[in-house]
Each structure stands twice: as structure tokens, then as C-alpha cells.
Image (cartoon, rainbow, N blue to C red):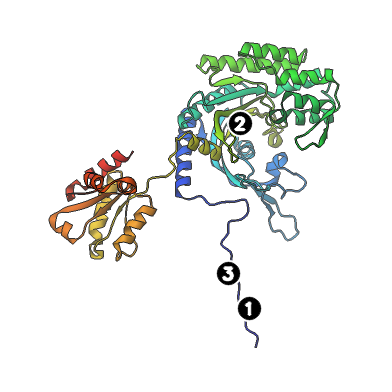
């Protein structure tokens, strides 16, 4: 009789494009999100937690590929005997679910509705270095008002958020532009009714950050050679037709008034362009009234994000300090947040235009920026570890831990095999514990405990001479009643 085939063990591997997050990273993210939520709450925004799963129909045009609903998102069709089950998908972002929530509950929600949401989103895209299929977003939106005060408030809140989490003024700038101004430029070019040419121009404008003014000029006209030497065909516009785009992209002046004047020249007689400039002017005045100067928020026509998505003002928060990339080259850290006004989103559900505006913060990028600025510790401090010298006295050790926890100190009893005391200290080191507490039978009889400063001990072991080691002891004997006070003193000295 043939031997039954042995079932192979499953491989313990993370799915491609996903990763696991351990204690320190999770704690850092949680603390950062709590800080951001405090700012949003202070501005009057309410928390919203919507479903991680939406119908593909609800996600609609925001899917990367509407004809193939499982492309770009993680989607599946629910079982149905007739094969007509609903298509469901993990949410692609936090904005499309907001549109569904508002349309569904609008009669019960205040208008305007101000909400913030934080959580993971999923994209079924090709992963790469630092590019994952699951990542966190942190959004804040106002739905139901066309007032530019809502846009100005979003920009002010974004500025306050960056400073509150630890990005100092001078290391960031919130840049503001308006999609209507760009529409005015397209009108000035004579492309208001040529959809294909408009799309070509918009795609070219989107490359401004990469190829610069001359590159955009070449791509709008005859074409250009890229870095590899390959020739990229241009849109085929004349130099005169391309000029309004160049004027638009390079219209930033030394102050807001100069920038707005340059934009007026770029849009010519376009009504929609003039409307966009007026909106930028209103936002600037409102921000100035709130004390937000150009050192924090600027009108900048080079912001061209989300050209097919946003309908009015657009915003981007850029970190301006320099870092070294993986090849050791200096570069600016770059964008950590973006958003804008999207007045067509809820209309898909209701048939009526509902104005809305908001931002999304890239949580992991902001956390990386805080690490670069030294605002997040490279190592989180672990718990105080109470060692076990006598397993029959576990109640005594639990009492110590309870006293420490009641005093607000993170602490735990060693729960492994206490037979080898050295292993207990190795465990404390692996946990990055700042302090170990030791009470054997002798200490118990004398009413004392030994408290070992593990951080100081490690530093002394690295470099101190024998004489220095004697002068700077890292282990202290204190009365049992002074346990909490001495541990607190050591922890305070380590900060």
C-alpha cells in the first residue's frame, strides 16, 4: 500500500507587497495619530470609522480600472447561484467611502459635515522598495459648503498639525493652487473643447517637477530626449500655444500679490480662470487674518496634483529640509500630505452637486520625517522587569509590579523559566528595559530590593575603566518601601 503523501508545511512568509509592524513602529504610529486627532478635534472635526470593504459600485470612477474591478484593488465577487453576486473591494482610499457615508446618512448628519478618518487602505499595485499594498492614511474633510473659508481652514489645520507632531516652522511649507486657474490657462490656449489635447497637456504639466520648465516646453511642442537618450513625442502645440502653460507654471513671485498678478496675465480673459484666482485671493486673505504667513502657507502655481480629480483649490504639504537618499545624495524630503476641493464626489450618489474639500496625510512618510528630525526615538523604552528569584513568592513580585503600574510606570514580571537568572537579564536587554528589580530571599528578610539601572550599566560596560565602574554603580539597594521612588528617579535620569 502506497504511503500517504505528507502534506507540506505552509511557508511562513509575508504576502508580496505587505509587511508586519512590531511594537515600536505600532506605538510610534499610534502616538502620532493620537496627536493628529487632537488637532483635528480641536478644529471641530468628528471621528468617522467606516467599513474597510465597499461595493465596487460605490468606489466607481475612483477605481484604477472600472472595466476590470479586480485590477488595482483587492476585489472579489460574492457567491450567487446565478453568478450575479455583488463585487466587493477593500477600500482604495478614505475619500470614496466618505462620499458613500455622506450620501447614505446625509439626512442625519449636520451640514456642513466635518469628519476625520484614520486607518489602512489597500491597493493591488506592483510593490517596490518602500511601496506597499497596505498603508495608513489620515484624512480630514468638510462636506457641504462651497465657502473658501473651509479650504483656508484645512490649510491652517494642516500647518498646525505638522508643527504639533514635531515638524518645526521653516522645515515645511503648505502650497496652494487652484484647478480652475489651470482650466483658464487651457481656455487661453484654445483647448477648452478639445478633450484629447487637454488630457495631453495635463499629463505634460504633471511632469513639471521632474523635467522643469524647458522639459515641459519641449513636451508641449516638438518633443524631447529623455535621460536615456530615447525621444519622447511632444503634444505638437506651437510655441505661442504653449506659452500660457509656461507662464502659469512659472508665475510664482516674491509675494502673493505678485503671484496673483502673474496668474491673471496667464489666464487672459478666461472667466473660469478669473474665478480660480479670486478663490486663491480669498484663501490668502483668510489665512493672513488667522496669522498664517508665507513662512507657513504659500500660493504656488506649480502644485498640479490630482488634475483629473480636484475641481478647485488644491494643497500640498512639502517638507523642505534635506536628507540623504539610498545612494548618499542630498535631496529634499518632499511631500507628506495633499488634498483639495472635489465638488463632484457625492453627486454620483445623489444627482446633486455637494461641495467638499479635504486633505490626506501619508502617515508612514510623516513618521519617517519625524525620525529624520530626531522627534521619534530610534528605540522605544521597554518595561521595567521584576525578576523572579523564588517562584514560590510570585505574589510578592506581582505586588511590586502592581505598585509600579499604579504609579504610571510600565512594568512586568518575568514569566519565563526563572531557573537561570542570566536569562532573565538577557530577556530584559532584549525588551530594551531600562530597569530590573531583584529581590531574593536575603533581600526579602532585610526588607530591601536591588534595582539595576540597565541603561547606565550598558554605557559603563562599553567604555568605563574599573575605577569609573566602581565610582558609578549601576545597581542600588533601597528599602522595599522606596521601590517606586527609586525606579522613578532612575527613569527620570534616563530621559
| Picture disc at residue 9 | 3
Q: In front here: 360 or 54?
A: 360
Residue 339 can be seen, yes or no: yes
Q: In front here: 55 or 203?
A: 203
Q: Quadrant of residue 303?
A: top right
Where is residue 237 shown, x and y percent of the image? Answer: 85, 24
- Position of the C terminus, as image quadrant, is top left
Dot 2 alpha-carbon crowd within 10 angstroms: few under 14, some 14 to 19, many 20 or more = many
* N-terminal label among 3 and 2: 3
Q: Secondary structure at mark 1?
A: loop
| Picture disc at residue 5 | 1
* N-terminal label among 1 and 2: 1
Marks 1 and 2, how far apart at CA: 55 Å
Dots 3 and 1: beta carbons under 8 Å? no
Q: Which residue is mark 2?
A: 338
Dot 3 alpha-carbon crowd within 10 angstroms: few under 14, some 14 to 19, many 20 or more = few
Residue found 80% across the figure and 28% down from its top:
219
Q: Quadrant of residue 96?
A: top right
Residue found 23% across the figure and 62% down from its top:
393
| In the image, residue 55 above or below residue 84 | above
Residue 272 can be seen, yes or no: no
Amino acid at each position: 500500500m502506497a504511503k500517504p503523501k505528507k502534506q507540506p508545511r505552509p511557508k511562513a512568509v509575508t504576502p508580496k507587497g505587505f509587511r508586519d509592524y512590531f511594537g515600536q513602529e505600532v506605538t510610534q504610529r499610534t502616538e502620532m495619530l493620537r496627536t493628529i486627532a487632537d488637532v483635528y478635534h480641536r478644529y471641530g472635526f468628528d471621528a468617522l470609522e467606516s467599513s474597510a470593504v465597499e461595493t465596487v459600485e460605490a468606489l466607481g470612477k475612483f477605481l484604477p480600472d472600472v472595466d476590470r474591478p479586480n485590477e488595482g484593488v483587492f476585489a472579489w465577487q460574492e457567491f450567487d447561484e446565478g453568478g450575479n453576486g455583488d463585487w466587493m473591494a477593500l477600500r482604495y482610499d478614505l475619500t470614496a467611502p466618505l462620499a458613500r457615508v455622506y450620501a447614505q446618512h446625509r439626512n442625519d448628519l449636520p451640514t456642513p459635515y466635518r469628519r476625520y478618518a484614520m486607518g489602512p487602505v489597500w491597493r493591488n499595485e506592483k510593490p517596490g522598495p518602500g511601496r506597499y499594498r497596505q498603508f495608513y492614511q489620515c484624512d480630514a474633510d468638510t462636506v457641504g459648503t462651497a465657502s473658501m473659508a473651509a479650504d483656508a481652514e484645512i490649510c491652517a489645520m494642516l500647518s498646525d498639525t505638522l508643527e504639533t507632531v514635531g515638524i518645526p516652522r521653516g522645515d515645511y511649507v503648505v502650497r496652494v493652487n487652484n484647478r480652475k486657474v489651470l482650466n483658464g490657462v487651457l481656455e487661453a490656449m484654445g483647448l477648452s473643447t478639445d478633450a484629447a489635447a487637454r488630457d495631453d497637456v495635463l499629463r505634460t504639466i504633471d511632469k513639471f517637477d521632474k523635467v522643469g520648465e524647458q522639459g515641459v516646453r519641449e513636451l508641449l511642442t516638438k518633443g524631447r530626449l529623455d535621460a536615456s537618450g530615447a525621444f519622447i513625442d511632444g503634444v505638437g502645440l506651437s510655441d505661442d500655444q504653449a506659452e500660457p502653460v509656461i507662464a502659469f507654471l512659472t508665475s510664482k513671485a516674491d509675494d502673493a500679490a505678485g503671484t496673483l498678478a502673474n496668474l491673471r496675465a496667464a489666464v487672459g480673459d478666461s472667466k473660469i480662470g478669473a474665478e480660480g484666482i479670486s478663490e486663491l485671493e480669498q484663501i490668502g486673505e483668510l489665512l493672513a487674518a488667522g496669522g498664517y504667513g508665507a513662512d507657513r502657507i504659500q500660493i504656488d502655481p506649480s502644485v498640479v496634483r490630482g488634475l483629473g480629480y480636484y475641481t478647485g483649490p488644491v494643497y500640498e504639504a512639502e517638507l523642505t529640509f534635506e536628507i540623504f537618499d539610498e545612494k548618499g545624495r542630498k535631496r529634499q524630503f518632499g511631500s507628506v500630505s495633499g488634498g483639495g476641493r472635489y465638488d463632484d464626489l457625492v453627486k454620483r450618489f445623489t444627482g446633486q452637486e455637494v461641495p467638499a474639500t479635504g486633505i490626506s496625510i501619508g502617515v508612514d512618510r510623516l513618521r519617517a520625517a519625524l525620525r529624520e528630525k530626531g522627534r521619534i526615538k530610534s528605540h522605544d523604552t521597554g518595561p521595567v522587569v521584576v525578576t523572579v528569584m523564588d517562584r514560590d513568592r510570585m505574589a510578592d513580585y506581582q505586588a511590586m509590579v502592581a505598585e509600579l503600574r499604579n504609579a504610571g510606570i510600565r512594568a512586568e514580571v518575568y514569566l519565563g523559566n526563572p531557573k537561570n537568572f542570566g536569562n532573565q537579564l538577557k530577556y530584559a536587554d532584549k525588551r530594551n528595559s531600562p530597569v530590573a528589580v531583584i529581590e531574593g530571599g536575603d533581600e526579602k528578610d532585610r526588607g530591601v530590593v536591588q534595582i539595576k539601572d540597565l541603561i547606565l550599566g550598558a554605557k559603563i560596560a562599553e567604555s568605563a575603566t574599573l575605577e569609573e565602574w566602581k565610582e558609578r554603580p549601576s545597581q542600588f539597594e533601597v528599602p522595599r518601601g522606596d521601590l517606586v521612588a527609586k525606579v522613578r528617579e532612575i527613569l527620570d535620569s534616563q530621559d
